[in-house]
Structure formats: C-alpha cells, structure tokens
Amino acid sequence: MEILEQEEKSLFVDVTSQKIYTLRSIQVATFLGGPIIAGYLISENYRAFNEDKKSKIAIVLGVLATIVLFGVIFMLPDTKKVPTYIIPLAYSWAAYILVQQLMGAQMKAHFSAGGGVYTIWRALLASLIGLAVTVAGVFVTLLVVG
C-alpha cells in the first residue's frame, strides 16, 4: 500500500514549486525582444509544466519566426512608410493570443493552485538579451551576404 502511494505521488508534479511568465510579461517582452523571446518565454512555461517536447518546439518556432520576420522586412519595398511600432505591436499581440490559446487554461490552473510567477523584470532582461542576440545575428548576416 505504501509503495502504491509513493508511485501515485511521483506521477503528479507540484506546480506550485514552478514559476511561469504571465501573458502580459510575454507580450511586453516580445514587443521589445521579438519573436525569439516569445519562443523562449513560452518554452520556459512549457518546461515548468513538464512538457519538454512543446518546450523545444517553442524555441524552434521562435527562431524560425524571427528569421521569417526579418526576411519579410528586408524584402518588402517601402517599409519606411510603416510606423516603426506597427510590426512589433503585431507580433506581440500575436504572441499574446497564441499563448492564451495554447496554455491559457494551464496558466489559470497554475495560478489557482498557488503557482509562482516570474517578475516582469526577468522577462525584460530576457528581451534585452534576445534583442542583442538578434541584432548581432542580423549584423553578421549582413556582413556575410553584403
């Protein structure tokens, strides 16, 4: 009987010991750091929920979205006429809606169970690091291609 209880306990993860990023933190950090940061923060949330496969997919999709975004930006004519905040607004709202659809219920359950939350400052730090990596990647790409 005791062995059965131990096995049963090990099947359930204590969500209250894990911290996750909120929808708003993901949205703000994505606005500043780009889609690559959305992928990273979503990945961290999936990791907290013990969904390693989805965590890896989120990282890959974040990188691919960043590559596609810059490809589209560089190929579009007259992007100078578009206000600079429109594109970040679009992908940050897209990330918000995506996270809400994919893991909104898990996040609500996490918060209801007393699960922890990372501060907005941690998300902002991640966005600054992601921005630096993205700028460096674009710079290197322009040096190699140009």
Image (spheres, rainbow, N blue to C red):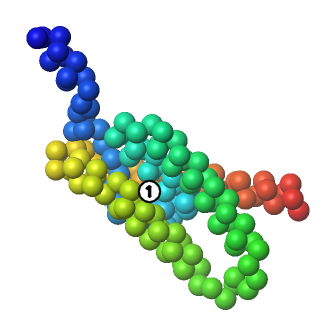
What percent of the width, then of the height, locates residue 51? 40, 39
Q: How many marks?
A: 1
> Is 114 on the left or on the right of 42, as rendered?
left
Q: In x, y percent, where is residue 66?
A: 62, 60
**Which image quadrant for residue 87?**
bottom right
- Residue at mark 1: 124
Locate the N terminus and report the quarter of the image it occupies.
top left
**8 with respect to 67 (left or right):** left
Q: Give neighbour class at mark 1: few <14, some 14-19, many 20+ (Cα, 10 Å).
A: some
Which residue: 49% across, 56% down? 38
Q: Which residue does the image show at 55% across and 60% down from the upper left?
A: 35
Whether residue 143 appears in this view of the structure is yes
Tag 1: amino acid: Leu
Q: Residue furthest left?
A: 1
Q: Is residue 146 above or below residue 56?
A: below
Hey, which quadrant is residue 2 in on the image?
top left
Instruction: Pick out the residue farthest to the bottom.
Output: 81
Where residue 63 appears, as percent x and y from the top left, is 61, 53
Query: Tag 1, which secondary structure?
Result: helix
Residue in the foreground of this view, choosing between 134 and 96: 96
Quadrant where the C terminus lies? bottom right
The x, y position of residue 62, in whole percent, is 56, 54
Specify whether 73 is left or right of 28: right
Q: Residue at x 30, y 43 (%)?
A: 19
* Res 120 seen here: no
